[in-house]
Amino acid sequence: MHETPARDLGGQPVGEIVAGSSSPSFHRLARRITLRIVALYLVLGFTYIALSDRVVIALVDDPRVLTWVQTFKGWGYVAVTGVLLYGLIFWQTRRIAAANEALAERDRHITRLNRVYAMLSAINGAILRGHDQDALLDEVAHIAVDKGGFPLAWVGLVDADQRTLRPVASAGAGLDCLDGLVLHVDPDHPEAHAMAADLARGHPFVINDLAETSPVDKCHARAVAHGYRALAVVPILKASRLLGVIGLFTREAPDRGGPVFDDDELRLLTEIAADTGLGMTLIAQATALDWASRFDVLTGLANRDLLKERIDQALLRARHQRRYVGVLAMEVAGLRAVVDSLGRQQGDRLLQAVAQRLAGQVREGDTVAALGNGEFAVLLADVREGLDVADVAHKLLKPFELELQADAPPHFVTLAAGAAVYPNDADTADGLIHCAGIALHQGGAQAPTGDCVFYAPEMDQRVREYQALDNELLGALERGEMQLHYQPVVRLETGEIIGVEALLRWHNRRFGAVSPDRFIPMAEHSGVIRPLGDWVLEQACARLARWQERGWRLRMSVNLSTRQLLAPGFAERIRETIMRHRLDPERMVLALEVTETAVIEDMEAVSEALARVKELGIVVHLDDFGTGYASLSYLQRLPVDTIKIDKSFVQTLDTDPVAENLVRSVIALARSLNMGVVAEGVETAEQRDALKALGCHVAQGYLFARPQPAEDVERLLEASNP
Ligand code: C2E
Ligand code: CA
Ligand code: CA
């Protein structure tokens, strides 16, 4: 607590004269006043003596009377001069007192301003040194007490939504004044604090006599109890936004009606608050810069730079201790589908959930980093052998459920991983990250979800090929390199063609025929699938319209990527296509095929989109059934008309009892759900007969017909429909 003589000067003039009596200005003043009194006294005395004697001599002749008169005159003189002296001395002493008070006031003012100046410069020093906001604000409060001489000082911050103010730093005596203080500083709030209006205008809020003012908050009464008399609260602003306040108490009372905090002082305090605000802004910028340069803003995980730093450190240690360092590159499956269907925000939530989960599953010395674009990397800083990496990867890859939409089944989150190990694959941070990434993407074929693929040198060549092919794919449509083939779908009993499946063919100028298994995932990855898919639909519908004109009732199945299906306006576009080709909605023979794995990735959004498609009379096929994780029970929740049993089951029907069981139960389930079943990939008569025996009636496969150009299919149709 800092009490100073200047601040304690009361209202007693005599005491002040004594207090100030040693100053040279006081000596000068005293001499001047004494001289003035003596001079006046002398003049009056001489004049009196000179004039009175003349008068007495002129009027009185008797020497005895004269002696009496002289004596009375002397008494009279003493009486009059006594009164006169009293008056003079009283008058001048009052002037001295007044002058001294003015002097003391000026002195006190200057002392206070000096203190506030000292405070300003100390705070500016703190700002230059500061790199932590809490420490800065704490220092501001302490400087206000130590340098500014305020017995109690505090700093408050406004919360993010600019509503409430709470003390965050304080110094001095009587800190309990601030306990539990929360002030509403939004002037529009019904419980807005008395200071809200001033602060909103950027002005200080001052109470010059706490004891005389009705309490503005609970701090007020406690402050009075501590003997505080006045209070100033100065806003800390950034531009015109309120960041917080500096609050200052004094024990001084307002003197003679004048304010405790005068304009000069308030101006300086405002400057201090402005500098504090600047300091806070600088610290915030520096922290943001520092943080953002090392961490991923969305997930709070380390970013690529920090990951590299940590890998370098791990490599140093591993070299010494002859141990391994593992780096996993991981990707969230189906992120794009979530973003396409539910929006970027839900995609971000998905990434945050994955980040949290990964970070919670690694050891202390390991680092989980976010590399952007839905990719993560994990540094396993100290492993005994490559197998350990596989173990950790296995743990991290466990699928989990995440609620993305209210009243919808949870989203099934799956990850894929690629791994690289020091010293086998690379011996630098960049090298390890690169190799893990290559293992993950495997030249575009993409590691299967739930699996970790280890890097192998031949993958590099695949990556280069992938990139070259990806480039070619961009212009493939424009160069006319794409063609649709059609594979007949037949009724097993009669061999009659009841439909076709449209399958895309790409013959590239450089790479020749490229398999859809290779370029479709690529197109999905780059987004080319949308124009490509639109083109396929257009071709297929045009072909279907021509066949309808010829009176052929065939079902046309078109494969659909979920990226197409979930794109905004897909249902509208397909409706427009159907109308343009005048496909009869009553006798609609268009079917869309979505794969089971794609559906599982985002069941809710896909179901919704499929339901909208079905409203147009379009039939939905669930493709590659049996390859996903899904349980049979989810089938009843999907708007699906027909299940296509994946060819891997059909082709092992005669050798694998598990396959036979699956086919049998799918057929039974489909029947109970009133769905159709199509078997694909039938290559042999044995497979066909086994299917027939199990109760499957529709199939496609090389045994009946290969995918072929439209004209060839038409010839087949003409032969069977003469
Ligand atoms: P899918 O939809 O399962 O198509 C059936 C695949 O099985 C086709 O491969 C077809 O040629 C092949 N296949 C048919 N019968 C047999 C058989 O008896 N034995 C064997 N081993 N295979 C048979 P394809 O044409 O290479 O297409 C591969 C995948 O590419 C398709 O699998 C489909 O998922 C995708 N795809 C093809 N065209 C398109 C398209 O226009 N859009 C989309 N999004 N995907 C397409
Ligand atoms: Ca298909
Ligand atoms: Ca299939």
Image (cartoon, rainbow, N blue to C red):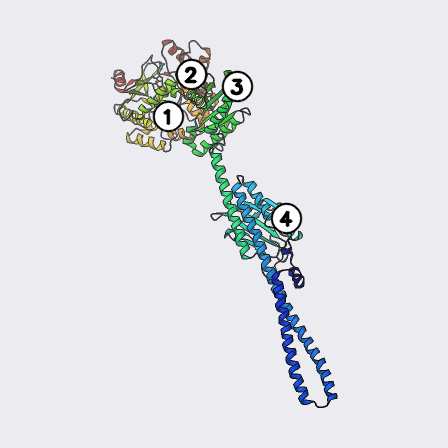
Q: Determine if residue 560 is in view.
A: no
Q: Write the residue at 54% across / 54% down.
A: 266
* Mark 1 in CB contact with mark 2 (< 8 angstroms): no
Label located before the other in sequence (1 or 4): 4
Q: Is residue 175 in sight in this rendering?
A: yes
Residue wearing tag 2:
456
Asked if 637 appears above or below 271 in the picture, the reply is above
Determine the CA span between mark 4 and mark 2: 69 Å
Label 4: how many residues lie within 10 Å, few (<14), some (14-19) or many (20+)? some
Mark 1: C-beta under 8 Å from nearest atom of ligand 1 = yes
Q: Distance between the residues labelled 4 and 3?
A: 59 Å
Mark 4 highlights which residue? 177
**Label 1 or label 2, whichever comes before in sequence order:** 2
Identify the amino acid type marked 1. Glu
Labels 4 & 2 near each other (Cβ < 8 A): no
Mark 1: secondary structure: helix
- In front: mark 3 or mark 2? 3
- As shown in the figure, which amino acid type bears the numbered disc 2? Ala
Label 1 or label 4, whichever lies nearer to me, is: 4
Q: Depth-wise, is mark 3 or mark 1 nearer the camera?
A: 3
SS for dot 3:
helix
- Give percent across and percent down for residue 480: 26, 24
